[in-house]
Amino acid sequence: MSAAAIDEIVGDCLAVRIRLISRALTSLYDSALDRHGLTIAQVNLLAALGKTGPCPPARLGEVLQLERSTVSRNLNLLLNHGWIEAISADAKGMREVALTGAGRAKVKSALPDWRQAQRQTEQLLGTTGVDAVRTIAADMGYAPDA
C-alpha cells in the first residue's frame, strides 16, 4: 500500500472516528452505571424489553441492531440477576423474555446516573452533534420507540 493510500485512510476514515467516539461514549456511560452492576448495553436491553413487552430475544437484537451472541450473553446475565425472566424456553434456549419487577426497579435506580452520563455526552457532542446523531439514526431507520 502506498504512503498516499495510508495517509488517506488515516486522515479521512469516518468509520474509525465513529468507532473511537462510540468507545469513548460507551466508556462514559459504563462508568456511570458501574455501581449498578450494569453496562449501557444492558440498560438499553432492559429498556427495549420494557418498551416492546415480552418478545423473542431476536426481536431485541433487531430493535438494537445487535448480533445474536451479544443479545444472548447479555440476556443470560440479566436473567441471572432476576431482571428479566424467560417466559418460554426449550432445549435451544429462551424463546420469549420479559422484564421483571426487579428489572424495572433496576432501570429506575440507574436512571439518575444514566441521566448524568447523558448530560456529559450532550456536552461533549454539543447541540449540533446531538442533533446530527439523532438525524443520522432516524435517516438510517432507527426507531427509538421500538
Image (cartoon, helix red, strand yellow):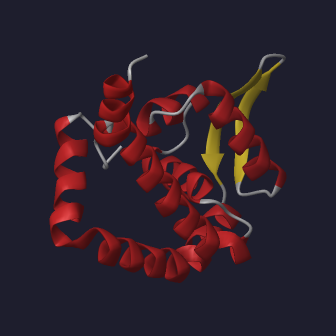
The mark total stands at 0
Quadrant in the picture for the N terminus: top left
Most foreground residue, 118 or 25 = 25
Vertical placement of residue 115 versus 47, above or below: below
**Residue 109 location in percent, x, y?**
61, 79
Quadrant location, the C terminus: top left
Q: Nearer the viewer, residue 102 or 25?
A: 25
Q: Picture coordinates of residue 112 (x, y %)?
A: 51, 83
Residue shown at 84% from the left, 17% from the top: 91
Asked if residue 31 lies left or right of residue 24, the reply is right
**In x, y percent, where is residue 99?**
62, 52
Q: Is residue 14 above or below residue 84?
A: above
x then y, percent, for residue 145: 31, 49
Specify whether 98 is left or right of 143: right
| Image: 72 above or below 93 | below
Compared with residue 83, is residue 91 higher up or lower down, i.e. above or below? above
Quarter where residue 74 is shown:
top right
Determine the residue located farthest toward the front in the rendered image: 3
Residue found 38% across the figure and 26% down from its top: 3
Identity of the residue drawn at 78% across and 48% down: 77
Along the viewing direction, whichever of 144 and 91 lies nearer the viewer = 144
Residue occupying image coordinates x 28% and y 42%:
143
